[in-house]
Amino acid sequence: MSSFAVCGGLQQIFLTMLLLGIALLQMFLAIEDVAGRRYLCALPDSILLIAELIGAGILCAAGENAADVAVVWLLESGLLLYAVVRYVRTRMRMRYSLSWESVKEGSDNLPDGICFFDEYGTVRLINRKMMAVGMMLSGKDIQTLDELRGALAAPRPGVECLDGTAGLYRFPDKTVRRFTRSWFMDRSGKQITEVIAADVTELYAKQVELNRENACLAEANKRMRWILDNMNDIVREEEILSMKIRIHDDIGHSILAAKKALIEQQDIAVIKENAVLWEKAADLLYRANNMPPAEDEWETVRNRAGDLGVEIVLDGTLPEEEAARHLLILAIRECVTNCVRHAGGDKVFVETEYGVKQTVFEISNNGRAPQHAVAEGSGLSGLRRRVEREGGIMELAVSPRFLLRVTLTERDLSKGVTYEECHDRGRPENDTEHSGRVY
């Protein structure tokens, strides 16, 4: 059996390097265990590290009575195998576990800026993108939550606040970012504040384009509403224009025919026939150019009521709002029809009352009161749908006399006329006139 002291110099060098290598490996394992808070694993690694250092010192200082070299090789081989296994397991665990470095690296690769503040408002984690955003906002690194708030409240020149409520800002690099803030609690119960500067450049551009298209659609809708409101006049003008074109053709034909008859010296009867056609065409053209303008809705409903022998008694004034005025006229027309058909009256009473935030219409007649509850026909049902579509309320009463009440709020009056109402304005008769049901 040979001791370490009498073995060859090459063997001593290799054995000493093995001792030191195992000691360094044990030191690495102990440090990783302490950093990962695995103190139970760090304890045996620390003990083995100390034992390796002490053993190396003993071997280097010992003489001929030192331990046998074979035993030392055997022990060091076992320790090396243990250290290698522990090292491989530690590296595998580090590969598949999160660490501070991996979290920081992952956050730095995010396209959005993100930072976390502790309960005192001090930065605990901030990625590279948020640092760049902070430099553009304030010209310096963001260190506290108060600094970030101040930078958002008064950004540097070149940073445009698009919407302070939504936290939208446009930066010199042409990006638009939205700042949001949230809170959560860590494992120790302390509040952590998270601030994210999300890149919403594409979304903001699409929103601007959508707003522009909505404005164009609103303008087109406004023009369409005007066309629908004036549909009767437009159709009337188109018909007059078509009639004028036909009359123009007839006059031209009559002139050519008369010219031909005079040149060819035809019979006087043919000339008179052409002259009569010419006179009729000129008379039609004159009457087309001098047609009276169409009456408005109020005059129309009063004239129709007069034709039916019903007088409309208005107590108050007509509404100025177009939607409310149209609804009132529809209700009056319906009540005039029902007064003649079912109540046998000759007067319809209309009362209008205007409050601060609402308008009330009440319509009644001097005819017979209904003997039973009113069963709404298609006319009253259609009127109710239109009132409710505007957000209003329609009520019916039968005692002591028939009464129809419509209540419109201020919000309802500002909505304007709907497409269906504009379309229905061109209808000559109400649905009730085709209904066989009572009221």
Image (spheres, rainbow, N blue to C red):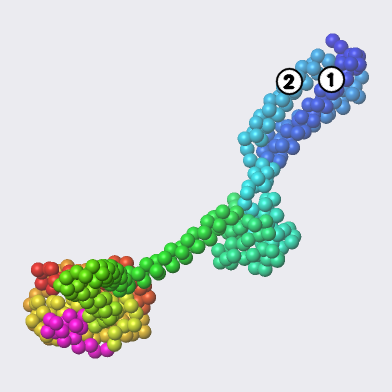
Picture quadrant where residue 368 is located:
bottom left
Above or below for 40 versus 183: above
Please state if 282 lies on the left or on the right of 146 as rendered: left
Determine which residue is flagged by label 2.
Answer: 78
- Name the quarter where the C terminus is drawn: bottom left
Q: Position of residue 3 (x, y in %)?
A: 87, 15
Query: Could you tell me which residue is drawn at 78 percent across and 21 percent down?
Result: 76
Query: Could you tell me which residue is drawn at 72 percent across and 58 percent down?
Result: 135
Above or below for 89 versus 264: above
Q: Position of residue 339 (x, y in %)?
A: 12, 80
Above or below for 327 versus 31: below
Magenta segment includes 325: no
Under mark 1, the amino acid is: Leu
Over which residues does the magenta segment extend? Answer: 301-316
Mark 1 / mark 2, whichever is N-terminal? 1
Q: Nearer the viewer, residue 87 or 152?
A: 152
Q: Position of residue 136 (x, y in %)?
A: 70, 59
User: Element type at marker 2?
Assistant: helix
Determine which residue is flagged by label 1.
Answer: 15
Query: Could you tell me which residue is drawn at 81 percent across and 18 percent down?
Result: 72
Q: Are the two marked residues, 1 and 2, in contact with CB atoms closer than 8 angstroms?
A: no
- Name the quarter where the N terminus is drawn: top right
Above or below for 402 versus 26: below
